[in-house]
Amino acid sequence: MSQQLTIVEHPLVQHKLTLMRDKGTPTAVFRQLLREITQLLLYEITRELPMTRKPIETPLEEMDALTLAGKKLALVSILRAGNGMLDGALELIPSARVGFVGLYRDEETLQPVQYYFKVPESLENRLVIAVDPMLATGNSSAAAVSLLKEAGATDIRFLCLLASPEGVARMKETHPDVQIVTAALDRGLNEKGYIMPGLGDAGDRMFGTK
Ligand code: URA
């Protein structure tokens, strides 16, 4: 992928996203839609995975059939909302290794602080797909990517449901090498850091909290 931001404008993605944005959509439906959209976005992000051929026998004859070349994958959930995307991603790529990054915002410095970090070994040999539904200010996403790089990752992609121009700019300036794949680029952030028009707090909507 050459450009850094990919917006997946597929009709199924956009239709499901509209349902997710609607405040009347119940928690269980919201969660299911997030799983489904994640899989459609993953289809896009993995489009250029290296392939190889292996000999197999169909019921009719032998052939050299296409198969994934074995690039190892790691899915990394940025807690807590990333977990809603992780489920769908693992259904599609069940053999992926899984990591978790937990960050909270220090109320005084407003900077992200790490409270949990657990990732698979040999990150340097893997395609690392970090998942977080909302790329809002970009501060925690950029910090999470920095932590993944410190842990050895060199090939990182960032998968989100909604992005703001501010979040994309922040990622571009800190991690220009990281491809971002999203379903939509919204107007911008409000004074509380919510993406507008957005869908509200993704974690609250998927877990039924307030
Ligand atoms: N996180 C969310 O869950 N929603 C936003 O709009 C911004 C950050």
Image (cartoon, grey):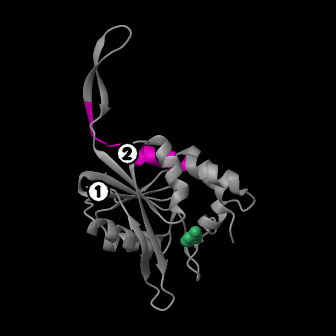
Kindly report the distance in space between the C-alpha atoms of the residues bearing marks 2 and 1: 21 Å
Looking at the image, the residue that sits furthest to the bottom is 108
The circle drawn on residue 46 is 2
* Label 1 residue SS: loop
Residue 23 in view (yes/no): yes
Q: Magenta includes 177?
A: no
Crowding around mark 1 (Cα neighbors within 10 Å: few <14, some 14 to 19, many 20+) is: some
Residue closer to the observer: 126 or 199: 126
The circle drawn on residue 121 is 1
* Label 2 residue SS: loop
Residue closer to the observer: 192 or 15: 192
The answer to whether the residue bearing label 2 lies less than 8 angstroms from the nearest atom of ligand 1 is no
Question: Residue at left 26%, top 37%?
Answer: 69
Residue closer to the observer: 51 or 166: 51
Say which label, 2 or 1, has the lower sequence index: 2
Residue closer to the observer: 162 or 123: 123
Residue 180 occupies which quadrant of the picture?
bottom left
Amino acid carrying mark 1 in the image: Glu
User: Is disc 2 in contact with disc 1, using a CB cutoff of under 8 Å?
Assistant: no
Q: Quadrant of ligand 1?
A: bottom right
* Residue 129 in picture, x, y percent from top left: 38, 55
Crowding around mark 2 (Cα neighbors within 10 Å: few <14, some 14 to 19, many 20+) is: few
Q: Is residue 70 above or below residue 205?
A: above
Of labels 2 and 1, the one closer to you: 1
Residue 84 occupies which quadrant of the picture?
bottom right
* Residue 76 in picture, x, y percent from top left: 41, 58
Amino acid carrying mark 2 in the image: Thr
Whether residue 38 sits left or right of residue 146 in the image: it is right
Question: Residue at left 44%, top 42%?
Answer: 94
Residue 198 in view (yes/no): no
In the rendered structure, which segment of residues is drawn in magenta? Answer: 37-52
Q: Is residue 62 above or below residue 52?
A: above
